[in-house]
Image (cartoon, helix red, strand yellow):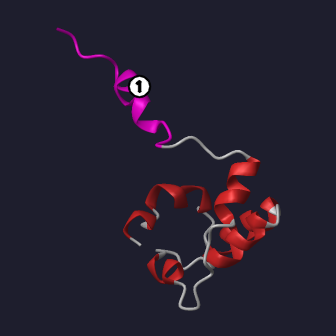
Amino acid sequence: MTTPPLATRTESSFEDFKLPLMRDGAIAEANRCLFCSDAPCIKACPTSIDIPQFIRKISTDNVHGSAKTIFEANILGMSCARVCPVEVL
């Protein structure tokens, strides 16, 4: 049995775990935020992004402002979804 090329073996590992939300879904999810006064999400964030601020911007359909908030704190903001410890909050 031959081993497939590396590109073939790793191709599936680069797929998203969940499909991205569409605009209406993102707004609905953002509106679920409790905007806690102690913001445990910021404390848990490896880069201390102001998560309530970017979620508030999503909830008002300000996607560009939300992205700006993320990228001002972390130039590698696109990787946040992969390392965010949200599942343990």
Residue tagged 1 = 7
Query: In the displayed image of the protein, which residue is found farthest to the top?
Result: 1
Residue in the image at 75% along x and 66% along y: 59
Q: Amino acid at mark 1?
A: Ala
Q: Position of residue 28 (x, y in %)?
A: 69, 58
From the viewer's perspective, is 5 left or right of 57? left
Quadrant occupied by the N terminus = top left
The stretch in magenta equals: 1-17
Query: In the displayed image of the protein, which residue is found farthest to the bottom?
Result: 37
Q: Position of residue 3 (x, y in %)?
A: 24, 16
Q: Position of residue 78 (x, y in %)?
A: 60, 56
Q: Nearer the viewer, residue 48 or 20?
A: 20
> Is residue 11 a member of the stretch shown in magenta?
yes
Secondary structure found at label 1: helix
Q: Nearer the viewer, residue 72 or 54?
A: 54
From the viewer's perspective, is 3 left or right of 34? left
Tell me the quarter of the picture where residue 35 sits. bottom right
Q: How many numbered marks does the figure carry?
A: 1
Q: Position of residue 6 (x, y in %)?
A: 35, 26
From the viewer's perspective, is 69 left or right of 1? right
Residue in the image at 41% along x and 25% along y: 7
**Pointer 1 local density, CA inside 10 Å: few below 14, some 14–19, many at least 20:** few
